[in-house]
Image (cartoon, grey):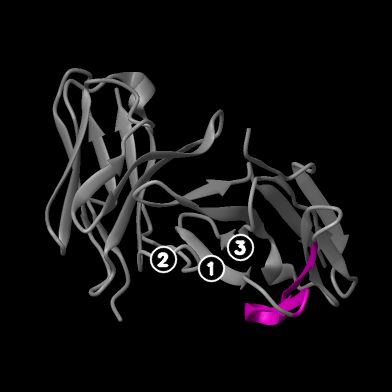
Amino acid sequence: DAGVIQSPRHEVTEMGQEVTLRCKPISGHNSLFWYRQTMMRGLELLIYFNNNVPIDDSGMPEDRFSAKMPNASFSTLKIQPSEPRDSAVYFCASSFSTVGQPQHFGDGTRLSIL
Amino acid sequence: AQSVAQPEDQVNVAEGNPLTVKCTYSVSGNPYLFWYVQYPNRGLQFLLKYITGDNLVKGSYGFEAEFNKSQTSFHLKKPSALVSDSALYFCAVSLSNTGGFKTIFGAGTRLFVKA
């Protein structure tokens, strides 16, 4: 079991640039989550997919953020244009889609927007 | 409103002493309760969960948690703390929701174990 794989692990870019974060969930898991973690706001759920369909995107901060899941083994989170306040650690997690199942987290992407 | 509270930002304990990290919740229905641990530069890792049955749940690394329905609490415990237990701990509640389920995380409690 390779676990949830996120790339890149670190990203430093200038304000205004497009940023794409990638996630490969655990094979067989059919729920996928994107989170953002900062010191000020803690862990925030951005969006949740079930069977590749977005179920809850109420946590997406604004239109600059978008997420896709074209198939069961890949998801992207895109920020365009990026701003310094988007600097955070972004986590992807996956699980089986039943309420009592734990989520498995990747090791995150540390994003710094200059 | 549904919520999870971890009333302590930080817990300090000496190595070898018992530790408790507190969690209370406010949700409708029967919740599923979880504890996760986060080490530096890593994602959250699942420790243990309560679904039904025995109120004392045992998990990874010698941790256990006690479910108390009347107090709506799910405190994490360990009889003898190790320095390597120092980390950030999150309590979480999972509920059925339209289209699937919803997980609510607490704000986290940082545990420091001193040698």
Q: Amino acid at mark 3?
A: Phe
Q: Secondary structure at mark 3?
A: strand
Q: Which mark is residue B46?
A: 1
Q: Amino acid at mark 1?
A: Phe
Give the alpha-carbon distance from disc 1 to disc 3, as whole Å: 8 Å
Crowding near pointer 3: few (<14 within 10 Å), some, many (20+)?
many
Give the mark nearest the N terminus, 1 or 3. Answer: 3
Residue A108 in the figure: left or right of residue B94: left
Q: Which mark is residue B34?
A: 3
Residue B62 position within the rendered picture, expressed as x and y whole percent measured from the top left: 72, 81
Location of residue A30 (image quadrant): bottom left
Residue at (62%, 57%) from the top-left corner?
Answer: B31
With respect to residue A29, does B100 lie above or below? Answer: above
With respect to residue B48, does B100 lie above or below? Answer: above
From which residue to which does the magenta span run?
A: B54-68
- Contact between marks 1 and 3 (CB within 8 A): the answer is yes
Location of residue B73 (image quadrant): bottom right
Residue A29 in the figure: left or right of residue B87: left
